[in-house]
Image (tube, rainbow, N blue to C red):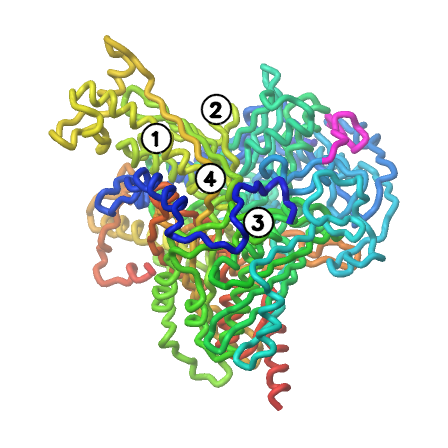
Amino acid sequence: MSDSDRVRETSKQPEGTERTESDPAEADRESETGAAREPDRKPESERDAITVDEEKDDARKIVTGQARYTADYRDRFPDLAHGKVVRSDIAHGYVESVDTSAAEAMDGVDAVITPFDDVVPDKLYSSSGQSYPEPSPWDLKVLREHVRFVGDPVAAVAADDPETADRAARKVEIEYRELDAVFDPEEALDEEAPQLFEADDVENKQSGADYSQNLESHFEGELGDVAGALEQASDDEKRHVIQTEWETPYQSHCVPEPHTTIAYTDEDDRHTFITATQVPFHTRRQIAHLFDVPIRDVRVKKPRIGAGFGSKQEMAIEPITFALHLAADRPVKLEMSRQEEFTALRFRHPMQMQMQTAVTDDGDIEAMDLYTLSNSGAYGTHGMTVANNVGTKPLPLYPRVSNVRFSGDVVHTNLPMGAAMRGYGAPQGHFAVEGHMDEVARRLDFDPIEFRLQNAVREGDLDRSVAILKDGDRFTRTIRSCGLRECVERGKAAIDYDDLEQPDEDHLHRGVGMALIAQGSGVAGKELGAAQVQMNEDGSFHLQVGGVDTGTGADTMFSQIAAEVLGCTPEDVVVIAADTDLTPFDYGAYASSTTYISGRAVKNAAEDAKERLLEWGSKLLEEPPDVLDTGDGGVYSERTGKRVSLEEIGYEATYGDDEREHILGDGNHSTDESPPPYGAQFVDVTVDTETGEYELNKLVFAADCGVAINPALVEGQIEGGEHMSLEYATSGDLTFDEDGNPDVLGFRQYGMPRTTDHPEMETILVETHEPTGPFGAKSIAELPTNGVPPALSNAIRDAVGVRLTELPFTAEDLMAALDDQSGAGK
Amino acid sequence: MSHMKIELEINGVERTVEASKSDSLLDVLRRNGYTGSKRGCDTGACGFCTVHVDGEPVKSCVEPVTKVRDTSVETIEGLGEQDDLHPVQQAFVDSTALQCGFCIPGMIMRSTALLETNPNPTEQEVREALSDNLCRCTGYKKIVEAVLDAAERMDSDTAVAADGGQAMDGDGGAATVTECALGDCDCMEGDQ
């Protein structure tokens, strides 16, 4: 793959040459960093602020209704105007004319903008909120003359109040020249299919693009010789070739707080955004480029945000809000409706996948071949990179398979656009890979868990499949922490794997399924986090960090990491985060990067400040710094036991007679590492063979996320991730009519699970120590979104012997499969 | 926008608010600074805007403001302060039953309404009572645990008070879980 912006060749090592532990270069690197890493590993007895259920720092604000989200800032802007977007009601065509006169004539209307206005940039961009230049095509315009799905923004209105904005938006009249549309990704690849983009409609094209057949990207990568291995296996009666197919639907983020932005220009002529974003710094850069203003003149502030799950990695509404602000010359708030969230914003990409393996009679996997066809929808944001992760997340579960091929096509249709969504291709990929592995085991009469463990990753393995789409081996990784086997063992016990009781009724059948899970911790080689610690004279600290708390509790985690280093309590650390004017840079909250990358930057900053604390402690205690350490709110001597409080140090450093210093520390973190957290998802299900209905009895998720900095928050991540995964397996889907109009307009038509839809859940944390992570931590946020679809498919297969391969699983599908099965048996 | 004046009580304070005929109760609350009630769907489908009207849980986004004339409305802002939390709020904090927090004010108002009418709910009763309130972050597990925990705290407070002991004290009296004073009642069994 010639994905040049993401690949930098650093190694001349020939392909296929595996590094070993005895490799001198590797050994040097290990010993060089090993000494520095060792203090990171703390036995439980020596931990103060980490692996503690520290109260979430905004919890009291939240439960009292005091937490301020973007829309809650309205009272700070007496002259705030309210925006409303006018969207395309056809799936494909050109805007011939826009008549804004009736809207503009209304009292209380401040601005109406169209693609033809000067304040609206006539420039291609990507909304992806990725690093620069984005590994997504630049194929969007702020308002669109060429509309490509029902919901494309064509015009926008700002008015004195929301009601007037709504009425004015309805008075904007748009005439279209309609074009033929295509809604099926396989049909879209046909040469006769309607074409969404002309070649010059896109800049920054991605690998393998061919817009003449609606192809946003084609990619492939291979280790070893897959065709040879498959051919050899099919000619050998002691080997087996098994192929399976899988299909997944659109899924909505159902982000609690709809996308909301307030844009204004302050008294210093600086363009300021209070916005619900996961990526303040990427948004600042993208806005600056799009509107051709200097980066320094743009400020992006993230207040509390009502979760993101990837949908707020997108710069989806900030440009329209800003254009409205420029046109209206007053602060503008744009807040999406729930219907817009369900029809016009961003979604998980639907996919069709094929998986093929060659397996020996002894249960060794000799080859894996995975293909995905991804429906990117109307625009290409995250199209290629999400599809890439369909393979590069789950295939590394089996790093010792020597022949691996992974390929994919990413195709445009006239439907809403896929984008980043928690899991990022891994939920689709795990459905195919872990459903497939279970099917192989059952067909060849292996225990499905034993078969997986026989082939699965272990600590010390060299994982090349994670970098299968890259040139060179820069991103090949050594697995330094892996608690997968303990996850499986403890999960099995929790779900009563070996003692499952069958119901008395003949038509009810119970089964258990399991899926192994892996994710990453940040984007390898494409991350940067930074932080700064400032000491106050009373021994407290201000921590400025670019990292973004989307509601996960990341700010609390930052305070715990800083406190563990500085020897204070987390409450003594005031976290100032995610404001491009006030905090150091950060790539933002995506790809499960915040603890691993931003958290490590915080640790580095705190360690930098700690050096100064020890210097001042040395002066006051009259002992050398190397016998001193921080803890219990002070600096103490390991030799004499004498101590001085942080407050004494703070006052002395600030107001001392001889010399003075503001105790500061700064830290950066960037790395080529992205260690996988691991998990095992178990599902216990009962199937009714008379109706095809099924009931989940229990979900168990056992996770290895390294060291859990805040176990209660980690459990929350797991349980919430399983919720989304449960929806994906059982109830979430978006459908469209034959003209591309959405059937799902809100929560009432969408199957988001409620309290009564959730089975019993048990969450297990398996601690390992990841030497490259802050205090041994890896990531957790995305890992648990991957497991329920394959584990439930496997459980149903266990219960009644049929295989469901298309999400979500309905009673009708299950009944049809049971009918096929009994038909085949006759 | 045609304006009218609506008189009602909000969190115990008599208020006269300006409104237009098409305003929902949520519109009026948010415009008047009660922004703890969140706008999640504007169709009564998510529960983020749940408040009490005359003690009943109501989705304020689909409650016409004209219907709440002369009623008593209670919002999340009327429940407890950050340093003096209501037992339900305290239980949500202590159980880490929140992440982004956008659904939490509505979830808490729904929970307090439940515990008013059913002080000792079973887990299933909690799940049914909260089934109109969506949460995307938590998987509901810790939320259900928090409500059961709150029931226990409030029950033991009430029991102590009935026993001639101290009523709920200044800090909500709920930071620590005390044994149920009713001895062999089953109120502890709701805890999963």
Are tags 2 and 1 found on a single chain? yes
- Looking at the rendered structure, whether the residues under marks 3 and 4 are on a common chain is answered as yes
Q: Is residue B55 highlighted in magenta?
A: no
Question: Residue A123 in magenta?
Answer: yes
Check the image and name the residue furthest to the left: A640
Q: Is residue A311 above or below residue A534?
A: below
Mark 4 and mark 1: Cα distance apart in space: 19 Å
Callouts 3 and 4 close, C-beta under 8 Å: no
List x then y, in percent, for residue B5.
60, 31
Relative image position of residue A31 (x, y in whole percent): 33, 42
Give the quadrant of residue A171: top right
Magenta span: A109-124
Mark 3 vs 2, N-terminal side: 3
**Which residue does the numbered mark 3 point to in the structure image?**
A421
Residue position for label 4: A671
Rendered image quadrant of residue B40:
top right
SS for callout 3: loop
**Which numbered marker is on residue A606?**
1
The kind of residue tagged 1 is Ala
